[in-house]
Image: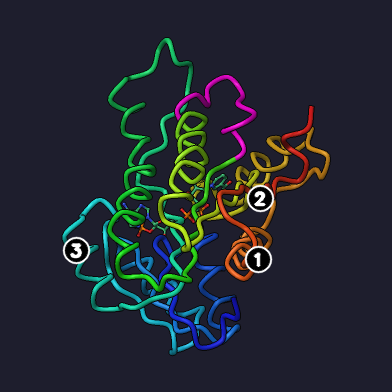
Amino acid sequence: MNLDGKKAIVLGGTSGIGLAAVQLLDSAGATVLAAGRSESNIEMARKTTEDSVTFKALDVLDRDAMATLFSDFATFDCLINCATGGERASGPFLQMDLDGFQGSFRKLWGYTNSVRIGAEFMSPTGAIVLVSGFPARKSNPGSSAIATVGNAVEGFARAIAPEIAPRRINVVCPGLIDTPMFALEGSARKEFLNKATANTLIPRAGTADEVASAIIFALENDYMTGSTIDIEGGALLP
Ligand SMILES: NC(=O)c1ccc[n+]([C@@H]2O[C@H](COP(=O)([O-])OP(=O)(O)OC[C@H]3O[C@@H](n4cnc5c(N)ncnc54)[C@H](OP(=O)(O)O)[C@@H]3O)[C@@H](O)[C@H]2O)c1
């Protein structure tokens, strides 16, 4: 797919990986609509993007609002969903608040909403990219919720690929990426990122751009569907 002149929606496109994808899509000549919940993120994102990018407020769990947003932007070619959904439970499973565990699945419900609702408003030659995360296949103790959700995202894409063909769907699986998803600041942030990546083959946090470039690859490559691209600095290796 040549992205020049194509229409792309990026859910969770107001921060981090999604925002980096928005910037790359815009540079490639796509018409981009980016969405997230908070006006404050939208305002920050506007400052780092060209005026050609449109931002809208949307909660990916609000299916009616999503249907309206999609139909207003139809027919679009690319759907990228990077929205975290809002909750990431961590800690030992046997001590975990099960509501928190289940709450982590908001990410999956946001993704499934967008594919179910978005498909009918997409071009038949369109492409979808979802974002999982390396705990899907290499979980450390305390990561059971995000590991389970990540697995579900990758399994969902493989399961749904034959049903939505000839539209394509792929997943990008990031390692630890330096984005606003981690609220820590200053030296505490640096220490956390360094410690968490010290034993990785490439011992540093990845950048949002490094993940976004894989999202662009998955959109552009017409011979790819139901696949997952790992951008994780070797984190999945033993
Ligand atoms: N950063 C990492 O180390 C890492 C590692 C593995 C996987 N991932 C995955 O990569 C994806 C992107 O993460 P990121 O690091 O770029 O996070 P981020 O910087 O926190 O960005 C998350 C984006 O999602 C939006 N969002 C969250 N919940 C939403 C909802 N219910 N409805 C609509 N928008 C929503 C946020 O905006 P609002 O909050 O304003 O809605 C924001 O635009 C996520 O799926 C995350 O799980 C990240």
**At x 51% / y 33%, what residue is drawn?**
151
Q: What's the distance in space between the residues labelled 3 and 2, CA to CA?
A: 30 Å
Q: Tell whether 75 sits left or right of 22.
A: left
Q: Which residues are magenta?
A: 134-145
Q: Position of residue 218 (x, y in %)?
A: 61, 62
Q: To which residue does mark 3 refer?
A: 65
Q: Are marks 3 and 2 in contact (CB under 8 Å)?
A: no
Q: Where in the figure is residue 148, as x and y percent of width and height? A: 47, 29
Disc 2 marks a residue whose amino acid type is Ile
Residue type beneath disc 1: Phe
Residue 125 vs residue 11, the one in the foreground: 125
- Secondary structure under the numbered disc 1 in the rendered image: helix
Label whose residue precedes the other's in the sequence (1 or 2): 1
**Rendered position, 200 above or below 95:** below
Q: Residue 158 at x, y = what percent?
A: 51, 43
- Crowding at dot 1, Cα within 10 Å, few <14 / some 14-19 / many 20+, comes out as some
Report the front residue among 7 and 45. 7
In the displayed structure, 128 sits above or below 92; it is below
The numbered disc on residue 135 is none
Q: Are marks 1 and 2 in contact (CB under 8 Å)?
A: yes
Residue 120 position (above or below residue 132) = below
Quadrant into which the C terminus falls: top right
Number of the front mark, 3 or 2? 2
Residue 106 left/right relative to 154: left
The residue under label 1 is 217
Residue tagged 2: 229
Q: Is residue 203 left or right of residue 78?
A: right
